[in-house]
Image (cartoon, rainbow, N blue to C red):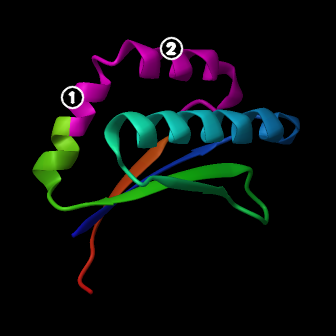
Amino acid sequence: MYRFERKITVKNVADMPAAMQFATDVTTYLNKRYDLHMRFGAEGFDKSRVHWFYDFDSADKSAELGTTLLQDQEYIALLNKAKGLWLDGSLEDTFVNLVN
């Protein structure tokens, strides 16, 4: 079992409500469209950062999803609407091999 996590920093703390709305919208879309059971949250201390995460059975399935998402025009449109919210260069993806 693996966990994928994506995190990104909000450019301005004043944009946090819009970032959380985006997180809600994109998570709802991906969960309905791809049955991911994705969740999201926000850091609560010194960083204005949003985190998304979901578990999957194999790295191959995650790679397939990535390829599919690059062709999903609705998903791309959601991303484009939120472009101005994020600090450039702050996106970070992590794959974790869960051992229990």
Residue 54 in percent (x, y) is at 39, 57
Does the magenta-highlighted stretch encompass residue 88?
A: yes
* Number of marks present in the image shown: 2
Measure the alpha-carbon separation of dots 1 and 2.
16 Å
Determine the image quadrant of residue 66. Answer: top left
**Secondary structure under the numbered disc 2 in the rendered image:** helix
Q: Residue at x 54, y 21 (%)?
A: 78
Residue 53 quadrant: bottom left
Verify whether residue 98 appears in magenta.
no
Are the two marked residues, 1 and 2, in contact with CB atoms closer than 8 angstroms? no
- Residue sitting at the far left: 60
Left or right relative to 62: residue 4: right
Q: Secondary structure at mark 1?
A: helix
- Residue drawn at point x = 39 percent, y = 49 percent: 93
Viewer-proximal residue, 47 or 81?
81
Q: Look at the image and tell me whether residue 8 can be seen.
A: yes
Which residue lies under the disc numbered 1?
67
The magenta segment is: 65-90
Residue 12 in view here: no
Q: Quadrant of residue 59?
A: bottom left
Mainly helix, strand or loop, the magenta region?
A: helix
Q: Which residue is mark 2?
A: 77
Q: Is residue 16 left or right of residue 72?
A: right
The residue positioned 23% from the left and 83% from the top of the image is 99
- Residue 19, x across and y down, in percent: 71, 36
**Residue type pointed to by label 1:** Thr
Q: Is the C terminus in the top left, top right, bottom left or bottom right quadrant? A: bottom left
Q: Is the residue marked by circle 2 packed among few (<14), some (14-19), or many (20+) residues within 10 Å?
A: few
Residue 14: image x %, image y %?
A: 88, 37
